[in-house]
Amino acid sequence: MIRLAVTGTDTGVGKTVVACGLAAALHRRGLRVAAMKPVETGVSFADPARDGALLARAAGDASTLAITAPIVLSDPVAPLLAARRMGSTVDLAALDAAFERATNGTDAIIVEGAGGLLVPVTERESFDALFARWALDLVIVAANRLGVINHTRLTIAAARAAGLQVRAVVLNGAAPDPGDVSRGDNAALIAELEPDIPTFELPWMADPRDLGRLAEAIERCGVLDAIA
C-alpha cells in the first residue's frame, strides 16, 4: 500500500496542489485512493471549496468529510492555537479512528498536513509525530524561489530526526515568472546536496483546481513514478 504524507516548507507553497495531483494521478492509474486532511483551519466544515473536500474529489474518494477531513477549526492559525481559541483540543484518538476508516480497503492514502512539518497539532505532537504515528512516507513541497534550498534542507533534517522517510521533494512553480534568478538551479542543487532524495519541478499552473491537467502535470514531472 502507498502511504504518503504531503508537507510543506511553509504555508502557501502548494501542498494542496501537489497532494491533489498525486491523488488524481494515482486514481487515474486505477488505484483505490483514500485522501485525508486531518486538521484544517480557517474554514467551515461544510465549505465545498476547502482543501479537504478538494483532496477527496481528486482521489475519487466517496468517504464523508467526517473521515477525509474530520477536524475543522475556524481561525486560520496553527491547529494547537486554533483549538485553544475555541476552548478545545485536537482529539488524536478521533484522528486515528478516521485514518483507520480511510485506509480500509484502499491501495493508497494521501494525507495532507497543515503548514509545515513542525506545526503543532497538540501540546505534545506536531505533524511529524502524527505522520510517524501513521507510518507515512513524506513528500516535501516547496515554492521554487530564493530561499528554497535552506527551507527544504531544514525540512529534510526535521523529517530524518522524526524517523520519516522522504520519498520526494517537489518544487512548485508558485508564480508564472517572478524574475527569480535562482529558479533554474534550485532543483539541481537540492538534488546534488541531498542525493538520496529525488527532486522534481512542477510548473506553474494557471488553474491548479483543474484536476485532469494537474494529474497530467504530476505524471510528466516524474514524481509519481518515484513514489508509486
Image (cartoon, helix red, strand yellow):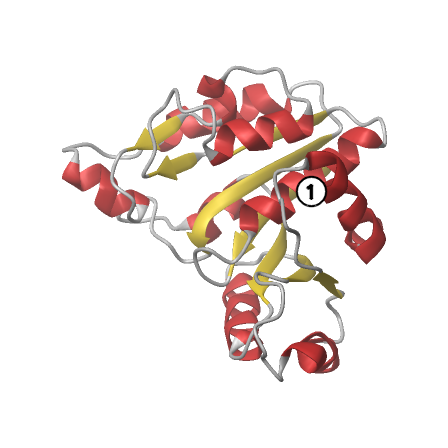
- Indicate left or right for 111 with 88 as reference: right
Q: Is residue 126 above or below residue 59?
A: below
Q: Is residue 143 above or below residue 79?
A: below
**Where does residue 102 sit, x and y in percent of width and height?**
58, 23
Residue 1 in view: no
**Where does residue 223 sit, x and y in percent of width and height?**
78, 54
Q: Residues within 10 Å of mark 1 (few under 14, many from 20)?
A: many
Q: Is residue 161 above or below residue 22?
A: below
The amino acid on which the numbered mark 1 sits, given as a three-letter code, is Gly
- Say which of 189 and 103 sits in front: 189
Residue 45 in view: yes
Residue at image position (78%, 35%) is: 26
- Indicate left or right for 78 with 185 as reference: left
- Say which of 136 and 113 sits in front: 113
Residue at image position (50%, 63%) is: 9
**Where does residue 141 sit, x and y in percent of width and height?**
59, 58
Residue at image position (52%, 25%) is: 68
Q: Quadrant of residue 71?
A: top left
Which quadrant, please, contains the N terminus? top right
- Say which of 32 and 142 sits in front: 142
**Where does residue 206 sit, x and y in percent of width and height?**
63, 50
Secondary structure under badge 1?
A: helix
Which quadrant, please, contains the C terminus? top right
Quickly name the residue at label 1.
Answer: 21
